[in-house]
């Protein structure tokens, strides 16, 4: 069982990813054909489960990381077509840029950062849940 404040925190983070997902779908969703098993954007309750893009964050305790605990940013595309590495990088950088804009709005007063951590990006900083 998880603490209700942790679930609320992650729901706010999920909402940030959902907004960015909708922007990417509107801008780039028709550039590559969807994987045959992937539903069209907006046809599932969770935007991460439909459309071309799969965005999210997975918590990590941060062992071995210079940034400590945080959320590894996941940016994926659901297509069987070849996506050139430079396009993948461009999409990832756009997600990171938008996260840097959206996180202060979703989590006002918190010092949250999005930084490269090895081969990925990580959201780190004040992940506290407040007073219990």
Image: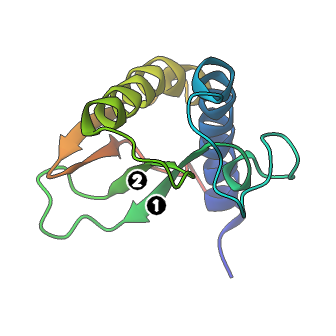
Q: How is the image coloured?
A: rainbow
Q: Local crowd at mark 2 within 10 Å, few (<14), some, or many (≥20)? A: many
- Side of 22 where 98 appears, left or right: left
Q: Residue at x 32, y 68 (%)?
A: 61
- Side of 73 where 66 appears, left or right: left
- Side of 80 where 121 appears, left or right: left
Q: Earlier in the sequence, mark 2 or mark 1?
A: 1
Q: Are marks 2 and 1 in contact (CB under 8 Å)?
A: yes
Element on which disc 1 rests: strand
Locate the N terminus and report the quarter of the image it occupies: bottom right
Q: Residue at x 34, y 30 (%)?
A: 87
- Side of 65 where 49 appears, left or right: right
Camera-side residue of 10 and 53: 53
Which residue is labeled 1 in the image?
A: 58
Q: Position of residue 111 (x, y in %)?
A: 36, 30
Q: Position of residue 43 (x, y in %)?
A: 88, 47
Locate the C terminus and report the quarter of the image it occupies: bottom right
Q: In the drawing, what numbered circle is on residue 13? A: none
Camera-side residue of 69 and 76: 76
Q: Residue furthest bottom?
A: 1
Q: Position of residue 129 (x, y in %)?
A: 54, 52
Q: Residue at x 39, y 21 (%)?
A: 97
Element on which disc 2 rests: strand
Q: Position of residue 116 (x, y in %)?
A: 20, 40
Q: Is residue 18 above or below residue 65?
A: above
User: Label 2 to label 1, Cα distance in Å?
Assistant: 5 Å
Q: Is residue 15 above or below residue 73?
A: above
- Total marks in image: 2
Q: Local crowd at mark 1 within 10 Å, few (<14), some, or many (≥20)? A: few
Which residue is labeled 2 in the image?
A: 71
Q: Residue at x 68, y 37 (%)?
A: 18
């Amino acid at each position: 069982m998880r603490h209700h404040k942790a679930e609320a925190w992650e729901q706010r983070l999920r909402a940030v990813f959902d907004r960015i997902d909708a922007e990417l779908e509107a801008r780039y969703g028709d550039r590559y054909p969807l994987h045959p098993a992937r539903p069209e954007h907006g046809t599932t309750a969770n935007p991460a489960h439909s459309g071309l893009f799969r965005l999210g964050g997975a918590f990590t305790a941060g062992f071995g990381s210079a940034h400590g605990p945080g959320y590894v940013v996941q940016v994926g595309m659901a297509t069987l077509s070849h996506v050139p590495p430079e396009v993948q990088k461009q999409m990832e950088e756009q997600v990171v840029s938008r996260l840097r804009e959206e996180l202060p709005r979703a989590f006002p007063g918190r010092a949250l950062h999005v930084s490269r951590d090895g081969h990925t990006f990580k959201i780190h900083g004040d992940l506290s849940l407040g007073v219990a």
